[in-house]
Amino acid sequence: MHKHILVTGAAGFIGSNLTDRLLEKNERVIAIDDFNDFYDPKIKEENLKQAAVSPNFKLYRGDIRDKALIGKIFKENSIDVVCHIAARAGVRPSLQDPVLYEDVNCLGTLNLLEAAKQHPVRNFVFASSSSVYGINSKAPFSEDDPISQPISPYAATKRASELMAFAYSHLYEIPITALRFFTVYGERGRPDMAVAKFTRLIYEGNEIVVNGDGTAKRDFTYISDILQGILASIYKPFPYEIINLGESRVVDVNYLISLIEKILGKKAKIKYLPPAPGDVSVTYADISKAKRLLGYEPKVQIEEGIERYVKLFLKREGVRV
Ligand code: NAD
């Protein structure tokens, strides 16, 4: 029997890749997305083109802050699993509009938890973020690290949502897993994120801006590896768990740029500016828990992932690769 899976944020980068993968597995996907203009909504429409023709796909265009709509979705569909991916993403823009981030990420999550309380589900998987580790001095970051120092509104909303989710799992026995994603990149990658932004700008011969001296380190995670972890989590409910999903390999921003330059065959024009407030200097996932609980085994190293991404980008631009 196929499962009925509610995917929030289904038109976005991770949500649309997840939706396609679930449909391939013959699951039924009930999707919600508000197609907001954080980046061009046409990209989001395009992301769902393949899904839209599937008989197993149903889309609600709307806002997760709309409690009545969320209630209606749960009434009209017998949801087995909630995969809550929708959010206002990104550290830096959260400093510009913290109220919006709080509203969507916290109230939106609460609406879904409330619905899951009223309409019991077999599993509730939630997209959290490595940013919750904040100014954690210990690396790699482990789920047991005592973290209470997020340094951006975005990070604080993700940590607050994890805590609210714990309360609901405890009070109403909703099985919940919060997955902490570490800098995800790959096909359909968000245009505001480094990999997509740098690739386009370097290709077009435009200047790229690097905040800091380029030695900030990130654990870049390829989309297919993140999907592997999300899928494993969907099919394996826990009373409440927090699980890191990263590659557990750290490279700096300058190295990332050199990889993009190599595949594009173009040199980047780089402008270095002071570090951006809210940015952390390193993210590095300890993934032993994901391996143990989910059988998670990330496969795509940054060199291969960037090659795949940039070649796909060039193909879309009509360049023969
Ligand atoms: P994305 O912006 O591409 O996708 C988010 C989707 O949610 C978008 O399609 C957007 O329209 C939708 N959405 C936003 N607000 C909504 C609302 N109020 N109602 C309905 N839909 C709404 O971002 P992404 O990179 O795919 O991120 C997906 C999730 O993973 C987010 O929760 C993000 O915080 C988290 N995350 C992402 C990364 C990453 O590196 N991409 C890292 C850590 C965590």
Image: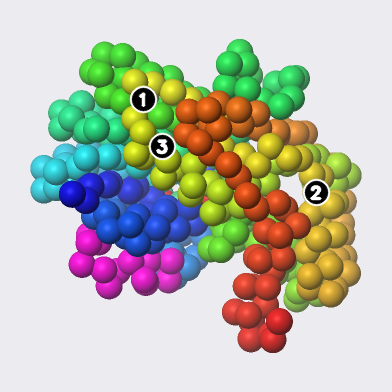
The residue lying at 55 percent from left, 53 percent from top is 223
Percent from the top left, x then y, of residue 197? Answer: 68, 61
Instruction: Name the residue type under label 1.
Output: Phe
With respect to residue 194, does 69 lie above or below?
A: above
The residue lying at 56 percent from left, 63 percent from top is 187
In the picture of the structure, the residue carrying the numbered disc 3 is 233
With respect to residue 156, does 20 lie above or below?
A: below
Q: Residues within 10 Å of mark 3 (few under 14, many from 20)?
A: many
Percent from the top left, x then y, of residue 230? Answer: 44, 43
Q: Nearer the viewer, mark 2 or mark 3?
A: 3
With respect to residue 156, does 57 lie above or below?
A: below
In the picture of the structure, the residue carrying the numbered disc 1 is 238
Q: Nearer the viewer, residue 206 or 190?
A: 190
Horizontal side of residue 186 vs 157, given as left or right: right
Q: Which residues make up the magenta segment?
A: 46-59
In the picture of the structure, the residue carrying the numbered disc 2 is 253
The residue lying at 71 percent from left, 60 percent from top is 304
Percent from the top left, x then y, of residue 112? Answer: 28, 35
Instruction: Name the residue type under label 2.
Output: Val
Evaluate if marks 2 and 1 touch, with contact meaning CB atoms under 8 Å apart. Answer: no
Residue 237 shows up from this direction = yes
| Residue 108 quadrant | top left
